[in-house]
Amino acid sequence: MKEYNINKKDVKINMSIEYAVSDHSIGKMEILFAEADKNMYEDKEAKKEQHRIKLGR
């Protein structure tokens, strides 16, 4: 993706991946997915804020 974004100026591609861990996932998958989703969005917001700071906004 980094190489694509360097070479293609029209559309920038980004990807966020997060995870959640449990010793025993039986019966907890919905909770784990929700936790991973929450972590991903928190990470995305932090990246957006860093970008805003770099741009001086």
Image (cartoon, rainbow, N blue to C red):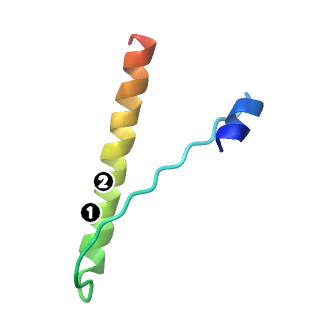
The answer to whether one can see residue 8 in this image is no
Q: Residue furthest bottom?
A: 26
Kind of residue indicated by mark 1: Glu
Quarter residue 3 falls in: top right
Quarter residue 22 falls in: bottom left
Quarter residue 33 falls in: bottom left
Q: Where does label 2 land, which residue?
A: 39
What residue sits 43% from the left and 17% below the top?
54
What residue sits 45% from the left and 14% below the top?
55
Q: Is residue 24 left or right of residue 15?
A: left
> Quarter of the image containing the N terminus?
top right
What residue sits 73% from the left and 28% below the top?
9
Tell me whether the residue at label 2 lies in contact with that at label 1, contact meaning CB atoms closer than 8 angstroms: yes
Percent across and percent down for residue 50 are 38, 26
Give the number of the disc on residue 35.
Answer: 1
Q: Is residue 9 left or right of residue 2?
A: right
Q: Residue furthest right?
A: 7
Percent across and percent down for residue 7 are 77, 32
